[in-house]
Amino acid sequence: VSLTRIQDLTKALNSGADLLELRTDYFTDTQLHYLVAHSKLPIIYTIKRPTKYLPKVAYTDIDYRSKLKPAGKVIRSFHDYKRTPASITLDRIIQSILKKKCIPKIATLVKSVNDLYILAKLQSKYKKKIIVVGMGELGLMTRLYNKSLLTYAAVSNTTKTAVGQLTVKQMQSTRLYGLVGDDIQHSLSPKLH
């Protein structure tokens, strides 16, 4: 669960999430020190601004081009807030990160079914070796039907860190159903279920 407000710490810790994400762009170093000390969950420490505070945590998330070399497990993140690049481009980025013995994270804006297909192929190919997150409303499917290492959720609807992000409660309660057929646009099934 991604924490964006210090007052939500207890709610986040009791949400049922497996990990707590702390981002440097939401907290001062003093607040981060407090949150790390008081977390009962393993932490993903996401560095989004320069900081001297580098705690020993479960995962440290940095930009894939960063020169930082934090101790422990490192997630190297590639973000594209405008589109989903071609599969071959993302594959090259993933391979370069894997060579550094880090966990690749790919987060892209999903604008079409083809974008979803690209991200689904990456999830299928690399499984738990990488993190794949589709941003935007269409990216929702990559969060619900996730075959990668993990996905991100918010404490509440007002604390989301990306468009398309669900709350922990929504992640736990949402069920996926499918409808197969020809000319399903006139089907009453979506209204009945």
Image (tube, rainbow, N blue to C red):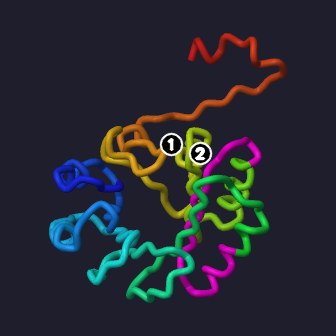
Disc sitting over residue 164 in the figure: 1
Label 1 neighbourhood size at 10 Å, few (<14), some (14-19), many (20+)? many
* Highlighted magenta segment, given as a residue range: 93-114
Q: Quadrant of the N terminus?
A: bottom left
Q: Is residue 191 left or right of residue 18?
A: right
Give the Cα separation between the discs numbered 1 and 2.
6 Å
* Residue 52 vertical placement versus 32 (above, below): below
Choose between 94 and 147: the one closer to the eye: 94
Where does residue 165 sit, x and y in percent of width and height?
Answer: 46, 45
The image quarter in which residue 124 lies? bottom right
The image quarter in which residue 58 lies? bottom left
Where does residue 177 sit, x and y in percent of width and height?
Answer: 61, 30
Amino acid type of the residue tagged 1 in the rendering = Gly
Amino acid type of the residue tagged 2 in the rendering = Gly
- For marks 1 and 2, the one nearer the N-term is 2
- SS of the residue at dot 1? loop
- Residue ID at (44%, 54%): 152
Q: Is residue 99 magenta?
A: yes
Where does residue 125 sit, x and y in percent of width and height?
Answer: 71, 64
Choose between 165 and 125: the one closer to the eye: 165
* Residue 57 vertical placement versus 88 (above, below): below
Q: Quadrant of the C terminus?
A: top right
Residue tagged 2: 139
- Residue ID at (21%, 50%): 8
